[in-house]
Amino acid sequence: PMPYERYTERSWTDRWPTPGYRLSWPGAVLFGLLAGVVALAAPAGAARLSEAAAAQSAFAFLVGLVWLIGTPILAVLSAVTIVGLPLALIVILLWPLGMVLGLVISIMVMGELFAGRIGTTYDRTARVIGGIVVATLILWIGISLPVLGGFIWLAAVIFGVGTLVLAVRFD
């Protein structure tokens, strides 16, 4: 009997799974559709998000990073008391929602950036759809990279949440 098991591709990926850092193509399509629907249904909001991201992109990243680290800390601190338990539950439930919204907003902001580069040949709807398709493809490819994918996913989520906070604050 061998004291160790040989590493195969399957056992290596089963050993250290990376949940949330892989984006399947149906997931990319879903996030792209969500971003497209929101960008087309609320063009003023999408423009406000793009303006906030362009005006203070580094600050948006910092605000998103504070959200990423601070939300679980706030939940733990508020769960210390009986009165704070409902608040802790709400805060923890909002954290994954922020992850989804952060990725959708990153796609929207990148899509608006690409839509502005397309030019005025096409109408706004076609430019926004084209920009969001390109942004979704770029993020999907980036998140699918073996080592960097998790960092790209994390950066997109952090940037999207920070942009949302700045856009709401500037409103």
Image (cartoon, rainbow, N blue to C red):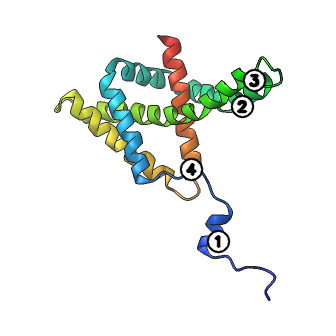
Circle 3 is placed at which residue position? 85
Separation (CA) of disc 4 from disc 1? 18 Å
Check the picture and name the quadrant holding the N terminus.
bottom right
In the picture as drawn, the residue positioned furthest to the bottom comes out as 1
Circle 4 is placed at which residue position? 21
Q: Are marks 2 and 1 in contact (CB under 8 Å)?
A: no
Q: How many marks?
A: 4
Could you tell whether 18 is left or right of 38 in the image?
Answer: right
The amino acid marked with disc number 1 is Ser
Front tag of 3 and 1: 3
Sequence-first tag of 2 and 4: 4
Sequence-first tag of 2 and 1: 1
Circle 2 is placed at which residue position? 72
Where residue 11 is drawn, which disc sits there?
Answer: 1
Q: Residues within 10 Å of mark 3 (few under 14, many from 20)?
A: some
Q: Are marks 2 and 4 in contact (CB under 8 Å)?
A: no
